[in-house]
Image (tube, rainbow, N blue to C red):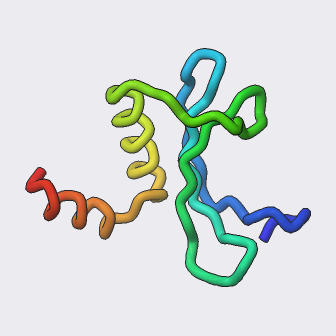
């Protein structure tokens, strides 16, 4: 857990969406348990209450960054591959 009681961010990647930023984070939740994944929209360093709107290309870019950063696991890729025969 972070110093102020917030979840502890383990890894994070972002993409620039003009005035907004798309972000995928791997974090430890406040309550005990395994790490979780959060996908969110940010503006000027603060999370937005609005949904994260992006193109397919921007989504692919964000997912690629998350995979390279180790946020999305090899098991995730294996499951995705087996489900869609990619």
Which residue occupies the extreme front position in the image? 50
- x then y, percent, for residue 32: 68, 83
Q: How many marks?
A: 0
Is residue 53 shown left or right of residue 25? left
Residue 36 sits in quarter: bottom right
- x then y, percent, for residue 71: 48, 57
- x then y, percent, for residue 47: 72, 40
Q: Is residue 54 above or below residue 83?
A: above
- x then y, percent, for residue 3: 88, 65
Is residue 28 shown left or right of residue 63? right
**For the point 23% across and 59% down, which residue is it?**
80
Judging depth in this view, the residue of 68 and 30 nearest the camera is 30
Is residue 7 shown left or right of residue 19? right
* Quadrant into which the N terminus falls: bottom right
Residue 18 sits in quarter: top right
Residue 64 sits in quarter: top left
Q: Is residue 38 above or below residue 51?
A: below
Judging depth in this view, the residue of 50 and 35 nearest the camera is 50
**For the point 16% across and 61% down, which residue is it?**
83
**For the point 54% across and 48% down, which residue is it?**
39
Is residue 71 shown left or right of residue 23? left
Which residue occupies the extreme bottom position in the image? 32
Which residue occupies the extreme right position in the image? 4
Q: Is residue 19 above or below residue 74?
A: above
Which residue occupies the extreme top position in the image? 18
């Amino acid at each position: 857990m972070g110093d102020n009681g917030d979840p502890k961010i383990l890894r994070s990647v972002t993409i620039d969406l003009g005035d907004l930023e798309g972000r995928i984070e791997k974090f430890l939740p406040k309550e005990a348990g395994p790490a979780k994944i959060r996908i969110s929209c940010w503006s000027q360093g603060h999370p937005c209450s609005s949904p994260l709107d992006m193109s397919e290309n921007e989504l692919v870019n964000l997912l690629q960054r998350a995979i390279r950063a180790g946020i999305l696991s090899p098991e995730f890729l294996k499951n995705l591959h087996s489900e869609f025969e990619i």
